[in-house]
Amino acid sequence: MTPFSAQRVLTDLTEQRQIGAYKTGLHRPSLSAAHMQSLQWLCEKMRAAHLDPIIDGIGNVIGRSAAAGPKLLAGSHMESQNYAGWLDGPLGLVYALEAARVINGDAKGAAVEVVAWFDEEGHFGNFLGSRSYCSGLSEGDIDAAIDRTDGRKLRDALAKVGLAGKARIGHEPGRHIGYLEAHIEQGDWLETRKLAAAAVTSIVGIWQFKITIDGTQNHAGTTRMAIRRDAGVAAAKLLVAVDTRFPEVAGPRTVWTTGRITLEPGAPSIIPGRAEILLQVRDADPETLLRMERTLIELVAAANDAGPCGLRVEALRKSHPAMMDVRFQNAIIDAAEKVAPGRHTHLPSGAGHDAQILSAVMPAAMLFVPSIGGISHHWTEDTSDTDLATGAEIYVEAAKMMLGCQ
Amino acid sequence: MTPFSAQRVLTDLTEQRQIGAYKTGLHRPSLSAAHMQSLQWLCEKMRAAHLDPIIDGIGNVIGRSAAAGPKLLAGSHMESQNYAGWLDGPLGLVYALEAARVINGDAKGAAVEVVAWFDEEGHFGNFLGSRSYCSGLSEGDIDAAIDRTDGRKLRDALAKVGLAGKARIGHEPGRHIGYLEAHIEQGDWLETRKLAAAAVTSIVGIWQFKITIDGTQNHAGTTRMAIRRDAGVAAAKLLVAVDTRFPEVAGPRTVWTTGRITLEPGAPSIIPGRAEILLQVRDADPETLLRMERTLIELVAAANDAGPCGLRVEALRKSHPAMMDVRFQNAIIDAAEKVAPGRHTHLPSGAGHDAQILSAVMPAAMLFVPSIGGISHHWTEDTSDTDLATGAEIYVEAAKMMLGCQ
């Protein structure tokens, strides 16, 4: 077995951050030139680690091993959010490559197979790559997908990079003992407690709601206050009601966010005739999500009854919380105790990850390493070299334990 | 003196509505082909009424008379809001043309001079045409003006229609005894009371404020509720505070409107780091406007002190209320009593009009006719033929009284 090398990990991380560099981060949207170049870089690294890379018809890159023993699937994603950080995604692939280099070729024939999932960041949809692999994506889903930044069709973008018509690789039942993914925490829990790593217990479910408010569009000068049906005022009142009521029914880690409010027509001298609110709730407990949804429905109904506007709520998306495999969690904690004694914990993940999709078809686990200041989805995202190296060593040890090759 | 003809008025109104027709309304943005065609139509009508039309360097069209007696300036605007109604603007010009046809050539040499002000609807700015005439518009203002729909420069748009480099016509002190403008009410006061006309008492002042809220942009999944600084929630709270507090300090006719709320970055999974609110207050009383402004500043300061976000308020625009000339108001009421006995009133204008700009340099007055359903700035805007005809007759009578030619 090749010895673990922290230097190799840091060198790989530094190499990949040159591809699509933006300030100290990355701008590497799905299927951009920089993204495709990063996949080529990954394929070379796979070949050097005796893996046989294939890029499939949805842009997943899978590096397979010819070894005859137990196999662990390990990876993450290479694309970034727009103008975002250098670790969100690539970290998990660099760690997986190192695990493959250390473990593959061992006497028992155990192997790590490395995978880069397409579009975890959702430029074109929700977890399109891992859903395709796990059989949760139809051709119709691909037909319908468009880039949220520039509106181009996924089909056209795939054709442009030469992937149109290529087969998509699906999950082979029995091939893998499970899936392992490393990621920065994207919060400040580990950093503030000076911990080196966390085993993720579960990945939150995300329930996304659209609230539509119908009022009456009218002239802002000639319409008396008494007869107005202002959709914007109704939107503000609902959000304040949510802000007051939600904390009373939330769980200890429930979070909710209104990321967008749209007033129509949005002109300074016109009373808004319509408003739309995007409200999202996240929790790892399905019961809590249901309770939050019921509360939202009650608040919308109360606002509707109070008038003068008409409100309705619609669930746009309900992803269910995903539990991480307990034996794999134990392997991560045991590995962390070996590498960084006493400096580890369990944490739920408030962000979505491909591991939640994989957990439906095989045991899945995640390792978190610290994020400086908890910052992510921003070019200042960072982790110290020490934490990056320690995390990599824990990851490789955990992979060995999962594969039973001590 | 030529007798008044309601038929001529209705024919003119019908002719002009063909130019840039949209459903039953108009789409005639400033300096569009339809707008320029409508100005040519107006010039022909002016010539037929023995007026000498000039289109000046800002797109104002002024039809001057060679008569030696007292002159009344009378008009409105030919351009429309985008996809809007057929009367908002052109009504005032058709009435002015009829007054010129009836009055001009009278034995005393009295005359109505007709004017179409450029861009009352604010495609490129605020009252650019009437401000240019009244000396309130610099070359720098014109340099800076851009179309709010498509962003093209006013200078380029003027050059395209051949107006670049032409002189702008300014107000000639002493030339006119005053200014008269007719307009649909854009509210339902006259219609619901079955009245035929109103003499406008004053045009409201419009104070436009921008409230900027600084929070902290962060990940909607990994950031705990307790440490969030959500600019969107702060915006909603401020708007509810405005909705609660403003009615307590408002005058009987004060109106206020939040037409636009912008959250940045506006993504469903990102906590808004910044919010911007456009809030407008209108009243005809300067004291009331000041009181509303002080209240807004207090509410913003209280929200700022309460935290966690930083709020600040800035006045973008303060147009002052404009009083209409009392003698001219009396002439309108006397004319209305003659044409439609008992079916008239006084009203303030909640919307802005060129008459407010003119009132700074000469006595100014406005006549309102009913709006069906109070609808305006929409293609369904309408007024019955009977009301249109009655309004025109009142207008011509009022113009005669103002000019002293009975």
Image (cartoon, coloured by chain):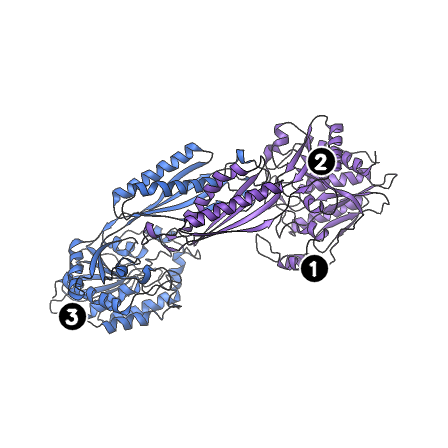
Chain colours: A purple, B blue
Q: Is residue A172 left or right of residue B110?
A: right
Which residue position is annotated with label 2? A10
Distance in Å between CA atoms under marks 3 and 2? 93 Å
The chain identifier of the residue carrying mark 2 reads A
Q: Nearer the viewer, mark 1 or mark 3?
A: 1
Marking on residue B105? 3
Q: Is residue B223 above or below residue B253?
A: above
Residue A277: image location, x then y, percent: 49, 48
Q: Amino acid at mark 3?
A: Gly
* SS at circle 3: loop
Point out the residue furthest to the top here: A342
Task: Identify which residue, A152 or B297, lies in the foreground.
Answer: B297
Q: Is residue A234 left or right of residue A296?
A: left
The chain identifier of the residue carrying mark 1 reads A
Find residue B247 and report its image quarter. top left
Distance in Å between CA atoms under marks 1 and 3? 79 Å
* SS at circle 1: loop
- Name the residue rendered at 66%, 45% in the picture: A19
Say whether residue B266 is visible. Answer: no
Q: Residues within 10 Å of mark 1 (few under 14, many from 20)?
A: some
Residue B42: image location, x then y, percent: 29, 68
Number of on-image labels: 3
